[in-house]
Amino acid sequence: MNENLFASFIAPTILGLPAAVLIILFPPLLIPTSKYLINNRLITTQQWLIKLTSKQMMTMHNTKGRTWSLMLVSLIIFIATTNLLGLLPHSFTPTTQLSMNLAMAFPLWAGAVIMGFRSKIKNALAHFLPQGTPTPLIPMLVIIETISLLIQPMALAVRLTANITAGHLLMHLIGSATLAMSTINLPSTLIIFTILILLTILEIAVALIQAYVFTLLVSLYLHDNT
Amino acid sequence: MLSRVVLSAAATAAPSLKNAAFLGPGVLQATRTFHTGQPHLVPVPPLPEYGGKVRYGLIPEEFFQFLYPKTGPYVLGTGLILYALSKEIYVISAETFTALSVLGVMVYGIKKYGPFVADFADKLNEQKLAQLEEAKQASIQHIQNAIDTEKSQQALVQKRHYLFDVQRNNIAMALEVTYRERLYRVYKEVKNRLDYHISVQNMMRRKEQEHMINWVEKHVVQSISTQQEKETIAKCIADLKLLAKKAQAQPVM
């Protein structure tokens, strides 16, 4: 039982070769491209969604920040599709692996910060001290701000990992509770099953929201630094 | 790629050729041939408008048609599922209930909001087509308007001679009026001169008459001598007395 609970989080291998790469490369197959103006319904809805998200996200940036638009839009689409595909039974979600989330969060955050330090060094350093602090507190506050800046990538990665992993674990646990109760007491099984359904709806929302939050925060770091 | 190695080796061997190494990739690409395949036969066969029909969203209809002569597809499906369950090829675990709930929510969502999303996508496509259609119609309308304007202009040109006739008439009338005015003025001037002559003549005649009368009077007065004047006055006084008596006598009667 204990082994089974975390079994779905082991990076899958096929005969010793990592299949995680194939799994990560799978979601783009679900988003077709088309060179026609009028497409089928799938492509039309996907194009409309992508246009909506990109417009929504990139309006707050200036010209320099908008050079990141391809990166951010592909990021949010990747995280959203990967999370949603992970809800299917017996599937593997790459975003549950801390390694992958760190690999996504660290370069993006570092890129934004280094860009800020390279171009507008005074503004970037000014972030370390909020306005209107009393003078004796300044050294301590600088240290605190530095720590909060340095912890941003870790927070991004761990936030995404923890949310998705926790959601998957909860679904497993409640599923196994339903399984256990199905032989004992049928009405309580139905109650627990209802809870499972509600949890599924929550998970779908969480999948989308986490993608949004991740990308939004990266975009905020970008906005601060352009 | 090996040609690049050859080129760089040649550059180190002969330094004069070093500048030629920059042409290496260009030469490499120039020797690549394009368009060696057969071109598309026109007309390219059109894309199908709808995808293949599927049952339960997963299994294509052709599968059912394929199976019908041999065995019932539902019986086959049920048999396979029961076989997998009973031999524990598919184990019922916690994952089963998770799968049930996820698939249940998905099916519910698709059944409930599927047509809405389909209509939305259709509406988006229709909007795009309507925009293009609008552009085409606007262009056609513009050209039609130009044609109509041209036609009306041509029709107007046909009727231009009316305008010219009217203008000609106007000018003739103006000329006539001017001529008559001048004629009248001439008449007035001539009459003026003639009236002057007439009045001069009249005045001359009057003056001659007066002069003649004055001359006659003067000579008559001169011709009356003093003697005759006294006799005439005495006679007048006697006549007057007689008349006065006659006059006095009348009212007494």
Image (tube, helix red, strand yellow):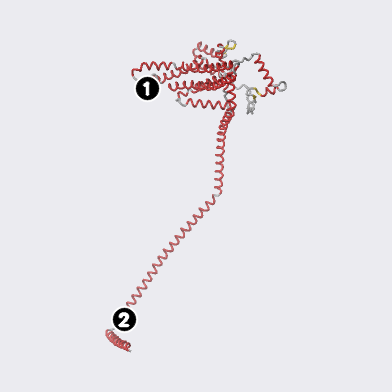
Q: Position of residue B130 (x, y in %)?
A: 56, 34
Location of residue B179 with respect to B149 vertically, above or below: below
Q: Which residue is mark 1?
A: A131
**Displayed quadrant of residue A224:** top left
Location of residue A134 with respect to B124 vertically, above or below: above
Which residue corresponds to the image point at 53% horizontal and 26% vertical from the top-left? A49
Q: Is residue A101 left or right of residue A181?
A: left
Q: Do the residues at discs 1 and 2 belong to one chain? A: no
Q: Which residue is mark 2?
A: B220
Q: How many marks?
A: 2
Front-lying residue, A161 or A108: A161
The reply to whether residue B71 is visible in this rendering is: yes
**Mark 2 residue element:** helix
Q: Quadrant of the N terminus of chain A?
A: top right
Chain to which mark 2 belongs: B
Q: Position of residue B147 (x, y in %)?
A: 56, 42
Crowding around mark 1 (Cα neighbors within 10 Å: few <14, some 14 to 19, many 20+) is few
Pointer 1 and pointer 2: residues touching (CB < 8 Å)? no
Q: Is residue A218 left or right of residue B239?
A: right
Q: Residue furthest right?
A: B69
